[in-house]
């Protein structure tokens, strides 16, 4: 049976849209908020990296 990937919420990574280093928790919060409330002016709205982070969290 394949082992699930563990994602640390405090792990930093480089965000292409924000052009800075952010942690997984901030990315997830910003992505979900921007898409749940349709904040189209947000750089996190429909962000590909944010979607990947959300999918990784959902699978872990």
Image (tube, helix red, strand yellow):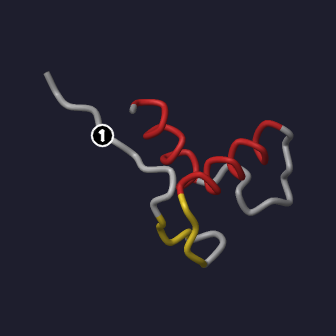
Looking at this view, name the residue that lies furthest to the left: 1
Residue at 30%, 40% (x, y): give it.
5
Is 43 or 29 nearer to us in this picture?
29
Classify residue 32 by image quadrant.
top right
Residue at image coords 70%, 57% = 44
Quadrant of the drawing holding the C terminus: top left
Left or right, 46 with reference to 37: left
Q: Where is residue 49 in the image (x, y as percent from the top left)?
A: 53, 55
Left or right: where 29 falls relative to 40: left
Residue sitting at the far bottom: 19
Which corner quadrant of the image does residue 33 belong to? top right
Q: Say which element carries label 1.
A: loop
Q: Residue 2's spot in the image, x, y percent?
A: 17, 28
User: Where's residue 4, x and y in %?
Assistant: 28, 33
Does 15 sit above or below residue 54?
Answer: below
Residue at 63 percent across and 69 percent down: it is: 17
Q: Position of residue 46 (x, y in %)?
A: 68, 49
| Residue that badge 1 annotates | 5
| 60 sits left or right of 53 in the view | left
Q: Quadrant of the N terminus?
A: top left
Q: Residues within 10 Å of mark 1 (few under 14, many from 20)?
A: few
Q: Which of 30 and 46 is in front in this view?
A: 30
Q: Residue at x 48, y 47 (%)?
A: 52
Q: How many marks?
A: 1
């Amino acid at each position: 049976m394949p082992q699930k990937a563990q994602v640390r919420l405090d792990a930093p990574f480089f965000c292409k849209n924000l052009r800075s280093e952010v942690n997984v928790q901030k990315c997830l919060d910003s992505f979900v908020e921007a898409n749940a409330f349709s904040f189209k002016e947000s750089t996190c709205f429909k962000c590909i990296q944010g979607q990947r982070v959300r999918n990784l969290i959902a699978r872990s």
